[in-house]
Amino acid sequence: MSSLSRAVSLVLLAGAVAATCSPPPNEPAHPARPANADPEAGTPLDSSADVGAAGSGDASVDAAEGSPAEPVVPASLADSVNAFARDLHRELSAKEKGNLIYSPLSISVALTMTYAGARGETAEEMAKVLHLGRDATETHAGYAKLIQKLGSEPLRGAPEVRLANRLWPQKGMELVPEFAEVTRLHYRAPLEQLDFQSQPEASRQRINSWVEHETKERIAELLPKGSIHEEVRLVLTNAVYFHGRWATPFAEAATRDERFFVNGVTPRSLPTMRGTVEARYAALADAQVVELPYARGNGPELAMVIVLPKTRNGLPDLEKRFGREGVGAYVPELRPTRVSLWLPRFTATRHYELSLILKKLGMTLAFSEADFSGITGRPGLHIDQVFHKAFVETTERGTTAAAATAVVMVGISESPTPEMRVDHPFLFFVRDRRSGAVLFAGRIVAPGG
């Protein structure tokens, strides 16, 4: 991962609705500095940027806050999602260059729905990679609680978090009743049959249209051209949408161009939000950490965590630590305080195909000799590709983020139309079909003479 992404290292929604991201090349993050900072390091924070007390007109929202909110993600799932985020980030950061943004929650939901139909060693591998507990029933029940909570209308002033699932089987394909029941009851995933065999492109467009609608037009073209073809038998999709206002918004009038060191070396002038905010903060040996809360209203307590390396080229070491310890490497030392903060606006979108990474993490059988007999009642179905796309935008007022995941499964056609192209050396036999006797035999390596 290049140092271009040395900015916002983690976006965590309640510690589990997570998207780890770095801003794009033209809008990365900027370190917080004390008011008497060296002028060479950028413009110091002035009193006009102090928005910590007023809350920029959102006092009515904050005043509505009541008793402590229940977590968005049940505790039984939070550890699983965070452990998967740790492993996934380790592999993505090693493979991808530039900014990273993804939703471990979205990927976990889509793959756990698929896991509901896995059997034998295939199920064991998937559970291990996803860090699921031994009790599959408990896992699915945990997701049912999560989806029920996110399916209600957001309360006034509260963050909006939406999660939607859907299954797209080949027209005429029957699913095992138990699998259909689990995905319908626990994941609220209705079925919509598509004709992948005769209308693959129309099917792709239909799925992409659903994803775009569920993410409020933030995620387009999740499935790229060519990803849906005649051999596809089932697609499982998840979509997540988040919109939250800062508990302490930044004053737009205080936003100014400030320096940011792209790749830790090249200074670039970027629009940078500035303010003194009420937040939880920690100064660690290798990083500064700040947790910026979103306005809660009577809703969940969600926040963005920013981990800033102490040195301009320190992000790789922080990511290695995250790959070993996860979120717990940064959060426990946070304490409430007032923080003078400089933070560039940033927007990022990234698109991934995750099959190679999931195989590297240990989910191999699901993509080859898979046993998904719990989906169709017979062998032959396996995962072909896993597509994921994520978006995040952070401004003076708050954050909008969205993500979607599609698990594309292929299998043997009920009415196969095999292709055989004899375009390389071959053997041949002339035989008596009644007796089985071979009359002539040979090989052809150069047809024609």
Image (cartoon, rainbow, N blue to C red):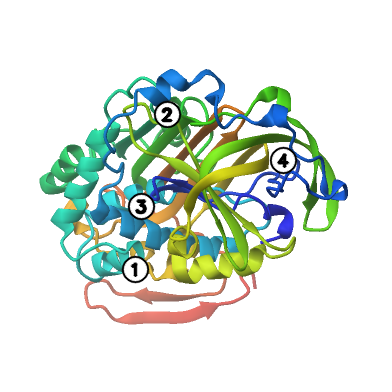
* Camera-side mark, 4 or 2: 4
Number of other residues with Cα within 10 Å of mark 3, as a class: few under 14, some 14 to 19, many 20 or more: many
Q: Earlier in the sequence, mark 3 or mark 1?
A: 3
CA separation in Å, label 3 and label 4? 29 Å
Q: Is residue 197 visible?
A: no
Query: 167 or 66, which is in the foreground?
Result: 66
Q: Which mark is residue 108?
A: 3
Please name which of the two marks, 1 or 4, marks the residue nearer to the observer.
Answer: 4
Residue 153 placement (x, y as % from top left): 30, 23
Q: Disc 3, disc 1: CB below 8 Å?
A: no
Q: Which mark is residue 27?
A: 4
Towards the viewer: 222 or 90? 90
Q: Which of pointers 1 and 2 lies earlier in the amino acid sequence?
A: 2
Is label 2 in a helix, a strand or a loop?
A: helix
Q: CA distance from mark 4 to mark 2?
A: 33 Å
| Quadrant assignment, res 440 | bottom left
Q: Residue furthest right?
A: 40
CB contact under 8 Å: marks 3 and 4: no
Task: Point out residue 162 in the picture as x, y percentages from the top left corner.
Answer: 36, 32
Q: Where is mark 1, residue-wise?
A: 365
Farthest residue in the left direction? 177
Q: Which residue is under mark 2? A: 206
